[in-house]
Image (spheres, rainbow, N blue to C red):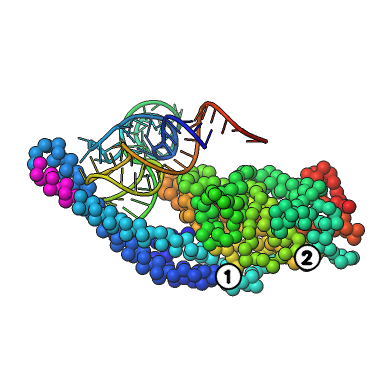
Amino acid sequence: MLDLNFIRKNPEAVKRAVREKHERVDIDHLLKLDADRRELIHQIETLRKQLNEGSKRVSQLKKSASGGQETATLVEEMRVLSDKIKDHEKRLDQSTPEIDDLLLRIPNIPAADVPKGEDASGNQVVRTWGKRREFSFKPRPHWELGASLGILDLERGAKISGSGFPLYKGIGARLERALFNFMLDLHTQKHGYQEVFPPFLVNRASMTGTGQLPKMKDDMYKIDGDDLFLVPTAEVPVTNLHRDEILNYKELPIYYTAYTACFRREAGAYGKDTRGIIRVHQFDKVELVKFVRPETSYEELEKLVKDAEEVLQLLGIEYRVLKLCTGDMSFASSKTYDLEAWAPGAEKWLEVSSCSNFEDFQARRINVRFREESTSGGKVRYVHTLNGSGVALPRTLIAILENNQQENGSVVIPEVLRPYMGGVEVISQ
RNA sequence: GGAGGGAUGGCCGAGCGGUUUAAGGCGGCAGUCUUGAAAACUGCUGGGGUCUAACGGCCCCCGUAGGUUCGAAUCCUACUCCCUCCGCCA
């Protein structure tokens, strides 16, 4: 959510951001509603002041126990005034939700160095890492490898739940577990993140706070009978951890990492990436979340990306880093880097991480602030929030299977995972 | 699921229709004293909105939302969350 005061002063910049991110919000209409609202507030406050003064006089008159008639007249006057205020307040209550709703639909403004672009084709490759493996045979896609190795059973997953709910078995299940344990250990032990294990169901306020609602409501699983949603990413519970708090400057920066399963309906993505586990309704992910001082957030974004990259480097997966253009970045983001791993079987780059600086956009929604040092005036300011996958599992698993496959169909386990696998070096039939 | 108890500022805690402009304490910050620190003393110390060039003024916030009243932290209703006990249960 943007600062309404900022919108008043910079309507053109806001309109540009709305256009660039392909949103539709009538900013002029918002400003009109806002002006009306402020006029109404002014009226109410004037009336309320009169009411407060009148009530005080009633109190004094009653105490002096004189002028019964005067008191009765005044009380009657105040009753009329009170009704008038209630009437005005009703009008205010009608306009406020519309303003709030419009505010929630305005996207964040892209940072100055974000490339302009309409869609994914406008994204810039910032760097690549790793050497493309030369295969002496035609690399097979992960769904074939997974099935023949008996570690991935999509048919039975579909039987239990439906298409897009993968079932990992045996050494495959262990590999999945090894991956997120490895990632959590790396981030907690080497990168200084605190591990949290949050709820997988969250309430509406949390979903709205991080920006999934109202825009993405069709992409989420909603619990029937309760106002709860399955988390589409750990970003939601972890970022909401400090909702409505004022942090001490000494606490910043705060780094959290969390494993959760993630649930996404992927409405509107039907027919895309239907083979294998490239796009599924349930997947595992290790998330990185930061709360930082505003001055440091872009520096913190670069560090966050490096932390995610290290996961891929240690796993020996070829990847590239993209800086997303205005048209392809998410609603709430100021600047986003995507990490894409190379999958030689599926023959495409797969997004395994998306790292964003939201500046104060989320902080404003979830009301997370911090108090400055008293030497800086002790002012209360919004923190900046960041997050990124560190990293998403199914596609990382795909990259491992497809990159590390051998001609006989077996797959070599990356060395860093072997301690988590009971020393298993190769998955074979 | 059933029965009770509770929710007040960063924390503890008073208040139970009108000097509440939310007592008091703790914590925090600044100052005095001191070579420095501690102690003691003094002062300051929540958030939001709105008007103003600014100084500052005014309005709102005592879990949330309604209601009663000239006036609500205080009375009424509903809801949420926490605690205790019972039942059920991994």
Q: Position of residue B6 (x, y in %)?
A: 41, 33
Residue nearest the viewer, comparing A113 with A394: A394
Left or right placement of residue B29 versus residue A359 in this view = left
Label 2 marks a residue whose chain is A
Give above or below for A253 relative to A140: above
What residue would you read off at disc 2? Answer: A346
Q: Are marks 2 and 1 on the same chain?
A: yes
- The answer to whether residue A39 is seen in the rendering is yes
Residue under numbered circle 1: A327
Residue drawn at 73 percent across, 56 percent down: A158
Q: Residue at x 51, y 55 (%)?
A: A208
Q: Residue A126 or B43: which is nearer the viewer?
A: A126
Measured as percent of width and height from the top left, residue A16 is found at 49, 71
- Is the residue A227 above or below the residue A325 in the image? above
Q: Secondary structure at mark 2?
A: loop
Q: Amino acid at mark 1?
A: Gly
* Majority SS type along the magenta span: helix
Q: Which residues are magenta?
A: A68-78
* Left or right, A286 with reference to A8: right
Q: Is residue A157 magenta?
A: no
